[in-house]
Amino acid sequence: MNDTIDSPNPMIASDRVEGTAVYNRAGDRLGTVERFMVDKVSGQAEYAVLAFGGLFGIGNRHYPLPWKALTYVPEKGGYVVDVTKEQIEGAPGYDAEGEEPKYDRDYKEQVYTYYGFPYI
């Protein structure tokens, strides 16, 4: 029994989200949630940072996805997004060992617009 899926509690601890698989609608595994970014003022999760590519975690890149883009699917034990591998590869992202972007308004506009979400 998976206590995360079967729990009546709608909340989940952050350490339980990190490492969760992310799939596209075709069932392809795109990567895992490396971390998520929370707005300090509103307290709302804004991004799930997807670890994608590489081999055994080496050489992968990080791609922030709007949190709204993810749907938790219990049968998959992970999140599903309406995004292809090719879309991820062309998305705003950064090297896992590189410097994180500034998660400011301009970056939010860039990421949200890329995935077709309103950013206001």
Image (spheres, grey):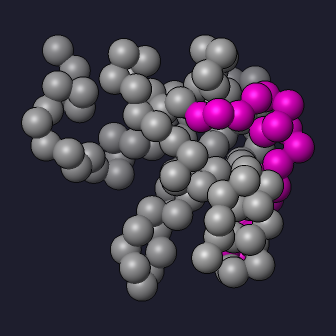
Q: Give whichever of 114, 23 is nearer the camera.
A: 114
Does any portion of residue 94 appear in the rendered image? Answer: no
Q: Give whichever of 18, 109 is nearer the camera.
A: 109
Locate residue 78, reporting x and y percent: 44, 27
Residue displayed at 73% across by 50% down: 115
The magenta stretch is 81-103
Relative to 51, does residue 43 appear above or below in the rendering? Answer: below
**Drawn side of residue 103 relative to residue 32, left or right:** right
Does any portion of residue 43 appear in the rendered image? Answer: yes
Q: Quadrant of residue 41?
A: bottom left
Relative to 68, does residue 32 appear above or below in the rendering? Answer: above
Looking at the image, the residue that sits furthest to the left is 8
Residue displayed at 66% across by 58% down: 117
Quadrant position of the N terminus in the picture: top left
Q: Give whichever of 115, 50 is nearer the camera.
A: 115
Relative to 101, does residue 21 appear above or below in the rendering? Answer: above
Locate residue 77, reporting x and y percent: 39, 22
Locate residue 36, reporting x and y percent: 50, 56
Is residue 96 magenta-colored? yes
Is residue 120 magenta-colored? no
Residue displayed at 20% across by 45% down: 10
